[in-house]
Image: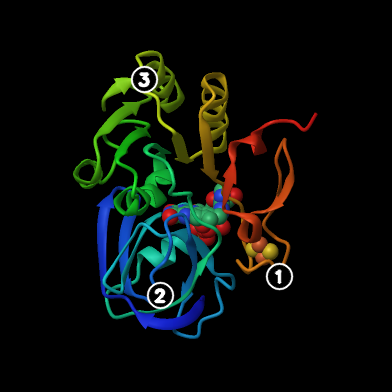
Amino acid sequence: MQRSIVTAIADMMPVAGDCFLMAVPFEPEPLPGQFVMLSFGDGRTDPFLPRPISIFDWEGGMLTLLIRVVGRGTLLLGRQAAGAAVRVTGPLGNSFPDDAGRVCFIGGGIGVAPLFYAAKRSKAKDRSFILGFRSADESYLTGEFSEVAPVRFVSDDGSLGEKMFPHEKLDALVAAGERPDLVVTCGPEKMMAAVHGVAKKHGLRDVHSLESRMGCGIGACLGCRVNMPGASVLVCKEGAVFDGSIFEEKQ
Ligand SMILES: Cc1cc2nc3c(=O)[nH]c(=O)nc-3n(C[C@H](O)[C@H](O)[C@H](O)COP(=O)(O)OP(=O)(O)OC[C@H]3O[C@@H](n4cnc5c(N)ncnc54)[C@H](O)[C@@H]3O)c2cc1C
Ligand code: FES
């Protein structure tokens, strides 16, 4: 059941140059892959629209969000301090499947955000991450992810882990005999499409958390529609988690 509440920020923690963690009391317990719509709770109307943010973590009634500053809304949210009021609406959207024995979670940049909680909560007997960042300087929470499951880091410049892209690492692992039953990804659309290409080549099941600009988060404004090669979808209502076939042209 979703709720819309005004609540006080419990904690704000900078994690890297342009990212921060925001902790807010929130119930009910969300499912991995779901998101919330976050806005200011002090009555201000600028920015007018709430911003969609994934569940980074939820523990004992405390929701943690990992947010990257990309524009005005996230900049202003990042300037809030503990005690400031925010409106949180959620949990929204569908969730990652959790019926596989071996799951590989693949994240790129801020796309790592929903994968921490997904791996932490997963009932899979074998969980691992492939996490890609531009560079070591632009990476974050590497220690925290490593505490949840084994991580293979890759980076564009080789300053963190191996110098390759996440889909290339997946390809290499499968070629070496490490075959996940399910691949879960979130990151830039190009990265997710490339991961789908590798998953299809090896006959792996893959799901992806898509992004789009959102107005309402509940299917009312039609603002989050994206035209993918496989379908035209409302990300908030039909996703944000989609099967990899969404990256394939319909025959
Ligand atoms: C389901 C979902 C979950 C998300 N989870 C997270 C998360 O956990 N952490 C996080 O930091 N961000 C997340 N995002 C992205 C986040 O919602 C946007 O970065 C945010 O809305 C930007 O708001 P702004 O006012 O700061 O930027 P704006 O001023 O609105 O935009 C700044 C720049 O970012 C681009 N942009 C804005 N929104 C998006 C978007 N949704 N997708 C792609 N580009 C966009 C704009 O085109 C522009 O170039 C998520 C998005 C979705 C749809
Ligand atoms: S955000 Fe309004 S319909 Fe999806």
> Which of the two discs, 2 and 1, sits closer to the camera?
2
126 relative position to 109: left or right: left
The residue carrying mark 2 is 28
Which residue does the image show at 59% across and 46% down from the upper left?
242
- Given the current orientation, which residue lies at the most extreme right position? 251
Which residue does the image show at 39% across and 50% down from the upper left?
113
The residue carrying mark 3 is 173
Q: Assign a secondary structure to mark 2.
A: loop
What's the residue type where badge 3 is placed? Leu
Q: Earlier in the sequence, mark 3 or mark 1?
A: 3
Which residue does the image show at 55% across and 29% down from the upper left?
196
Q: Assign a secondary structure to mark 1.
A: loop
Q: Residues within 10 Å of mark 2 (few under 14, many from 20)?
A: some
What's the residue type where badge 2 is placed? Pro
Which residue does the image show at 41% across and 24% down from the upper left?
170
- Given the current orientation, which residue lies at the most extreme top position? 175
Where residue 180 sits in the image (x, y, percent)? Answer: 40, 30
- Please name whichever residue, 30 or 125, is drawn nearer the observer in this view of the structure: 125
Where residue 183 sits in the image (x, y, percent)? Answer: 45, 35
**Alpha-carbon span between mark 3 and mark 2:** 37 Å
**Alpha-carbon span between mark 2 and mark 1:** 22 Å
Above or below 161: residue 129: below
What's the residue type where badge 1 is placed? Ala
Q: Assign a secondary structure to mark 3.
A: helix
- Please name whichever residue, 143 or 199, is drawn nearer the observer in this view of the structure: 199
Q: Earlier in the sequence, mark 2 or mark 1?
A: 2
The residue carrying mark 1 is 220
Above or below 111: residue 200: above
Q: Earlier in the sequence, mark 3 or mark 2?
A: 2
